Amino acid sequence: MNPAMTASPATSSPLAIRPARHEEIPALERLIAASARALSQGFYTPEEAEAAIAHVFGVDSELVDDGTYFIAAAPDDPDQVLGCGGWSRRATLFGSDRFAGRESGLLDPARDAAKIRAFFIAPAAARRGVGAALLKACEEAAQRCGFARTELMATLPGLPFYAANGYVAGTETTVDCGGIPVRFVPMAKYLSIK
């Protein structure tokens, strides 16, 4: 995917959306931890948020290798990362490199749903359209690769965002994060035919 300028619905200012690079992973890990700590308040306890950061949240470097993990940056400062998120044609539904339940096998677009993965927004950029711009870029890229459906594992704070963007919630599930149960919600969506 070439770098693209996408208007943020909440601010009408364009965002630069482009694939993440390997050298950016440490900075993305810091953004993810800051996002999880700040934006999970009221949804998860501090202990749950820290357990999820340690065991589930983070960058899946396979998505970076595949060119399907994106960064939304400020248009006037490409080093100012406002958010990150991606999609995958692999079987893993969620989890960073640290997550044990990973499956690298490739999906079949004719029968499988593409995976929407690891969306995290910088706390200062929350609710300004960054997530929506990233989600649109991911859904469009998945459609170009032949996928008609997407699915994801939503965090509790992410649930309203995905529901507002057409995702339907399944039954809440709990993931053991180092002995601390953390709740997530599987969600799915049919992509419109273009």
Image (cartoon, grey):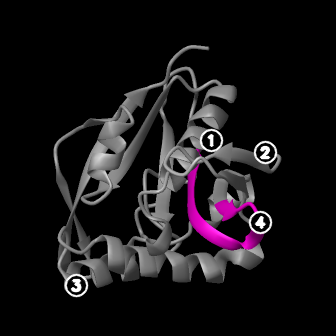
Ranked by sequence position, the earlier of labels 3 and 4 is 3
Q: Which corner quadrant holds the N terminus?
A: top right
Cα distance between the residues tagged 3 and 4? 34 Å
Residue, far right:
2
Q: Are marks 3 and 2 in contact (CB under 8 Å)?
A: no
* Residue 48 picture location, percent across and down: 22, 78
Cα distance between the residues tagged 3 and 1? 31 Å
Q: Are marks 1 and 2 in contact (CB under 8 Å)?
A: yes
Q: Residues within 10 Å of mark 3 (few under 14, many from 20)?
A: some
Amino acid identity at mark 4: Asp
Cα distance between the residues tagged 1 and 4? 20 Å
Q: Are marks 2 and 4 in contact (CB under 8 Å)?
A: no
**Residue drawn at point x = 31 percent, y = 84 percent:** 50
Q: In which quarter of the view is residue 25 placed?
A: bottom right
Residue stretch rendered in magenta on the structure: 72-89
- Per the picture, the main secondary structure of the magenta-coloured stretch is strand
Residue, far top:
193
Ranked by sequence position, the earlier of labels 1 and 2 is 2
Query: Which secondary structure, mark 1?
Result: helix
Q: Is residue 97 left or right of residue 16?
A: left
Q: Are marks 3 and 4 in contact (CB under 8 Å)?
A: no
What label does residue 46 carry, if any? 3
Q: Residues within 10 Å of mark 1 (few under 14, many from 20)?
A: many
**Residue drawn at point x = 28 percent, y = 60 percent:** 157
Q: Nearer the viewer, mark 2 or mark 4?
A: 4
Q: Which corner quadrant holds the C terminus?
A: top right
Ranked by sequence position, the earlier of labels 3 and 2 is 2
Per the image, the residue denoted by label 4 is 76
Query: Which secondary structure, mark 2?
Result: loop
**Residue 58 higher or lower than 54, as above or below:** above
Tell me if I can see residue 91 in this picture. no
Query: Which secondary structure, mark 3?
Result: helix
